[in-house]
Image: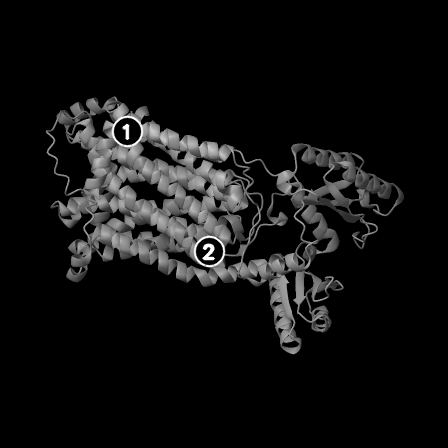
Amino acid sequence: MATFLHRIGRRAFERRWLVLLLWAVVLGVAGAAAAGSSGGGSSSVTLPGIEAQKAYDLLGKKFPAANAEGASARVVVRAPGGQKLTGGKPKAEVKALLKDLKQSSPRVASVTDPFTAKTVSADRTTGYAQVTYSAKAADLTDADHKHLDKVLEEARGKGLTVEASGTALTAAAAGGSSEAVGFALAALILVITFGSFAAAGMPLATAVVGVGITISSVTALSAALNLNSSTSALATMLGIAVGIDYALFIVSRYRSERAAGHDPREAAARANGTAGSAVVFAGLTVVIALVGLAVVNLPILTAMGMAAAGAVVVAVLVAVTLVPALLSLAPERVLGRAGGRRTARTSRTGARTPLGERWAVFVLRRPWKVLLVAVAGLVLVALPTAKLELGLPDDGSKPPSTTERKAYDMLAESFGPGFNGPLTVVVNDTDPAATKKAVGELTDGITGMKDVAAVSPAVYNPAGDTAIVTVVPRSAPTSEKTKTLVHDIRDRAADTHAATGAEGLVTGTTALNLDVAAKFAQAIVPYLLLVVGLAFLVLILVFRSVLVPLKAALGFLLSVLAAFGAMVAVFQWGWFKDLFGLQTTGPIMSLVPILTVGIVFGLAMDYQVFLVTRIRESYVHGAGSREAITEGFRHSGKVVTAAALIMTGVFGGFIGGDDSMIKSLGFGLAAAVLFDAFVVRMTIVPAVLALLGDRAWSLPGWIDRRLPHVDIEGEKLTHPTPPTTATTDTTEPDFTHAG
């Protein structure tokens, strides 16, 4: 591997303009494809294989008119000052509002009247109207949104309290502030790390190219593959983070090779052969973790995993080809103007021990104490994980300032907390008589249940073989009582099925949450076995050790559990919520934990590969086990620190976004990177390696004989390049010397 990438690096350095042209063409083609695409990423979530989704699909088949794809809005109206909505003036104002809603757009198909549709609360102060459009939400124009907003604002000016929710409302603008924050932090850290704007600019430039290609590709495929709107955000998040980090490691190794006396071309080739090999295997572990998300068998999760994996593949390819080409454009400037001054000063006064090496020495002096303190700290942070609650986002999880949240609260106050989360019971059989009998038995049973506020009369399809029964709970959608009610209704439906043969299915917000949580619980063990198993084999191949990969996997578990604990404390319990700009707290979105597990596992193996390969490189070149640890930290400690800070900054930038899933995912990933890089890899890893000694690098002979030798340490790089005068210091960039 090292020899192959050495040749790639040398060729890219020599033929820089060809490499630059090829990547420019790829970026241009991807951009043109995106420009020619209708875009239109879906905001819906399809969850096959669960009862709630099966019920929804059956409704679409048996009640096609009720499953129209047109946009809709629910307009909630409340009379001023405790007046009755059915009174003279408020009623007239509501009638005028309904007329204006009908005329707000030629795409408005219908507007229900709350007085005739009986959608006025029992105290007659609040009601709601349903606005249905003939066009899909994605096809509504800015004029449609503006006219709807104008009608609502005019009604508010007349004294009514008017709020709205639904797909017809203007979607929150997806700005680039999150990406900008991440890039700004990354640029600052890179300049401090390298002390050179040229060196700092290369990782940023390559990340822009990689992310540009990835996002353009995702945009081009969004309409054809019906990709969820969160897919591009996740691909962007990961593309920026790994794109910068992978280039950072190669540029940093180039500076080390130049300090060792190699000419620019050979230094770039050697950097690509050694650090590039680590990048390839680190990227491979991330890709395995992301592609493995397909095991869960949820289309949205599979699509997000594949898109993110694509971003990582592009980042790896850019790092091992475009970085050497860019190095050829500024072979001296990437070393920094302070390099020569440091070398002269070092020759006079002696080298200052890098912080990474000093930290490794500290750990090696007391490995047991450091190990116990680090593990105990992570376990303490992970304790809130036991209270983790999962859910799907709804209007109740939006900030209190939004009109959707205000409409949600008004409906809960006037119609009861269960109104916002009704349960839909779908009864189906090929024999209409069996369906009718089952509906009667089910309705009688459900009506007598404790937490039921209302049961609507059954609505049958024209064939009479399928019926819908709407059940309004007394409790809120996320309450334990509503969850118990779902189980009770399903138990009753099972009894009815045994007696009549008709199938009864339950769907709704609470039912979806329960089904998704159960599906994830079933999938998490096979997923971890697959991903950890494959990555374990890759790491055995890289490190030629069994204990090192085992330690890496156990460290990952500590990191991810600590990240979950932090997420629960902040997003569920509200600790430091003002610090992170949270306006509401509640359950974590169901997709976030398994996405976090997949991404964090890949990134954890990133830092494992980058740090431990340098330790192993020293070990296989003759250093003792403890000396190899300090040598590895001397060369890679500061760079791994910079990479972790960059990735934390990129992920943390997404906490300020509007998407609830991306916000919590960004926080979870930022916390996990901090825990994994600084506590596990920089603290627990050297402590464990010190305790294991030479045993850490042992491998049973029968395994060793069967494994191919990938030469990630660059042992086969035997090009005898005569040393030249070093122009920079002999260690990795030191924050304390940044100039």
> Quick one: label 1, few (<14), some, or many (20+) residues within 10 Å?
many
Quarter of the figure that contains the N terminus: top left
Q: Nearer the viewer, residue 346 or 456?
A: 456
Res. 133 in view: yes
Q: As drawn, which residue projects farthest toward the bottom?
A: 499
Res. 738 in view: no
- In x, y percent, where is residue 65? 70, 53
Q: Which residue is mark 2?
A: 384
- In x, y percent, where is residue 673? 38, 45
Q: Nearer the viewer, residue 637 or 523?
A: 523
Q: Which residue is mark 1?
A: 325
Quadrant of res 724: top left
Check if mark 1's residue and mark 2's residue have beta carbons within 8 Å: no
Quarter of the figure that contains the C terminus: top left
Q: Amino acid at mark 2?
A: Pro
Mark 1 or mark 2: name the one nearer the start of the chain.
1
> Quick one: label 2, few (<14), some, or many (20+) residues within 10 Å?
many
**Secondary-structure class at tag 2:** helix
- Position of residue 603 in the picture relative to residue 440 (left or right): left
**Secondary-structure class at tag 1:** helix
Q: Which mark is residue 334?
A: none
Q: Amino acid at mark 1?
A: Ala
Residue drawn where x is 36% and y is 60% of the image: 529
Residue drawn where x is 49% and y is 55% of the image: 298
Vertical arrangement, residue 211 with respect to residue 562, above or below: above
